[in-house]
Image (cartoon, helix red, strand yellow):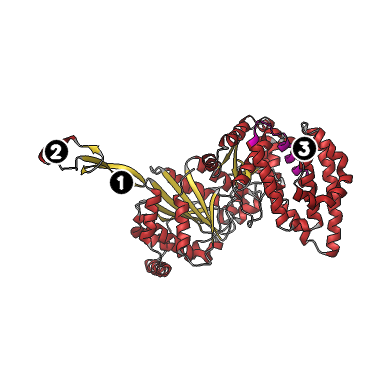
Amino acid sequence: MMLVDDDTVQNLQKKDSSADRLATSLLNTFNSPFSAHTGLSQHCVYRNVKLYLDTCVMPFYAPHLQHYWQEFPLNEPDIKGRIDALSLRLIYSDTVLHQSLKPETQIAGLVFEMLEQARVESLLPPQWPGMALNIDQLFRHWSRTFHDSGLTDTTVGILLYTLAQMCRARLMAQAVSAETESLIEHTRAALSGAIGTPLSGLRRCQQDQQKYADYALEIAHIIETMIETEQRILAANEGATNTEKVLKGFAILLDVVSHEGEGIATGIIDNNKGRSKVKSVYHVFTTQFDKVVFPAKLVRAELLREYRTHLDKLVLQQTININRLARQIVLKLSQLELDGWQSAKDEGYIDGGRLPLIVCSPSETALFYQAHLKPIIHSQVSFLVDCSGSMKTHANKVATLLDILVRALDVAKVETEVLGFTTGAWNGGPALKQWRRQACPPHPGRLNSVSHLVFKQAKQSWRSGRLGLASMLKLDLYKEGIDGEAVEWASQRLLNQETQRKILIVISDGSPMDTATHQTNDPLYLDNHLKDVVFAQQRLGVEIIGVGVGIDLSSYYPRNLAIDLGQELDVSLFNTLVDLITSTKR
């Protein structure tokens, strides 16, 4: 079991003197009982305030481990606190047992989750004071954020807030802060009578997860009953808006819990066999109709030149300095390598061949030689464009964006390849007909043909490939999208190259969608395959970056950027893209 933060942990270890304590918390997860409980040796990654088991989100939804308010940004103590808290969860909590006991209803499940996280944090050994400080700071920051967002102004909000403060104070044997105590005083007095007995049981049984869960379930059902009563009152008087806002603040959004929590929970409980029930093994019904297409060959020469003329006009309208972008790329992507030696220098290594000059000219100082370093780029950048039907409206902007980037990379002497992906037909096409002729066997897998598009090859310069880039404007190419296979195909083309860094930029406006495949398989069949492919190709050495066109692609691509093509393609956008492409691989 390994817990790693892709971007954060290494930075924190470099910047903070508490790196040893943080590293200790991570290393202890290798001996976590979680591995024994699951029977699996999995790779855990902390990313975007969530813990991933391979590509699935772990079902840890304690309120103070979530972050939904962008106006209250995360800072380093928050990030360290989350990592430490999740480490303790892996060490001290039996995930299988917890998921088997967790109530199915929203509110009871949330309270049960919150109490279990409080239990594991109370078990923190005293020899880890740094972790204790990080976790305490995280909880205090969450408390302030929840209060400052106005959620404690509602009856339901103050009830859940008070419960969190009371249970943590009892388990940690700590008093709540004076500010918080004045806020919850009235609610705590009313709540103590209802949950006093099971609350005492939590403290007595915090070392025994099974016994602790009995008291936690009792509290969860009491709180659920109280909130349901309050919801009925709100529905009659104020409406459900306030209640929904509070529930969102406590991280029980329906889509998060149902799609992420339940799926991974089932997989953990049923081990590998159970996980296959949630994530079917990806397969293809038939590859007979698959093909690799060069769109420039499908367009009449006259029409292709018209596309190119139109694209040139669009590029000129952007007023982007190509040479400046190229210099940025060279500066950030290149490595200095030895390119010979230069003699007759005033400093450096002594040049024995020039020492006789001291006799002839005692004032001579150019007696040294230096290494001549030349910036060399050992990288290839591939762009993979989603050519599904919804991308038609963005075709002009995407083609313009790529034309400028490819030209700048070409000036910087970086090889580029521009690829695309779509399907051979709408709604299955010949593949679907073949499946029907075979009496529609269940779970057919991918049930459409794929068309991999090559707009520009790696060995082509921008000038020789400019007509191919213009063929992106051929809108009848755009059908449906099977992203996972396209990412795998593009990654394999990169892996066949000899360059050191292999960078793949995927430009898409949403999740994978092929109607025939979607209707005949699991609802998340294509989504899960894409996540698996991205994870696997990254481990093989391909740096994959998702660029979302008006959408956040973080659920598929750990490194991602959302852009708005409804706005002009300004300098700041290209600077951001260049920074993303050239950022140091972690």
Does residue 314 appear to the left or right of 233 in the view shown?
left
Q: On the picture, is 399 further left or further right than 448?
A: left
- Residue 275 lies in the magenta-colored region: no
Task: State the SS at label 1.
Answer: strand
Q: Quadrant of residue 195?
A: top right
Question: What amino acid is at disc 1?
Answer: Lys
Q: CA distance from mark 1 to mark 3?
A: 63 Å
Q: Residues within 10 Å of mark 2 (few under 14, many from 20)?
A: few
Is residue 193 shown left or right of residue 326? right
Residue drawn at the location 67% of the way across and 49% of the way down: 141
Q: Which mark is residue 480?
A: none
Circle 1 residues within 10 Å: few <14, some 14–19, many ≥20:
few
Q: Are marks 2 and 1 in contact (CB under 8 Å)?
A: no
Nearest to the observer: residue 576 or residue 17: 17
Looking at the image, tell me whether mark 2 or mark 1 is earlier in sequence order. Answer: 2
> Which residue carries the number 1 mark?
374
Disc 3 residue type (three-letter): Ala
The relative height of residue 425 versus residue 175 in the rendered view (above or below) is below
Q: Which residues are magenta?
A: 111-129
Cα separation between marks 3 and 2: 81 Å
Q: Quadrant of residue 228?
A: bottom right
282 relative to 139 in the view: left or right: left
> Which residue type does callout 2 highlight?
Ile
* Nearer to us: label 2 or label 1: 2
From the image, tell me which residue sits under label 3: 173
Numbered circle sitting on residue 358: 2
Q: Secondary structure at mark 3?
A: loop
> How many circles with numbers are drawn on the protein?
3
Q: Give me the C-alpha separation between circle 2 and circle 1.
A: 31 Å
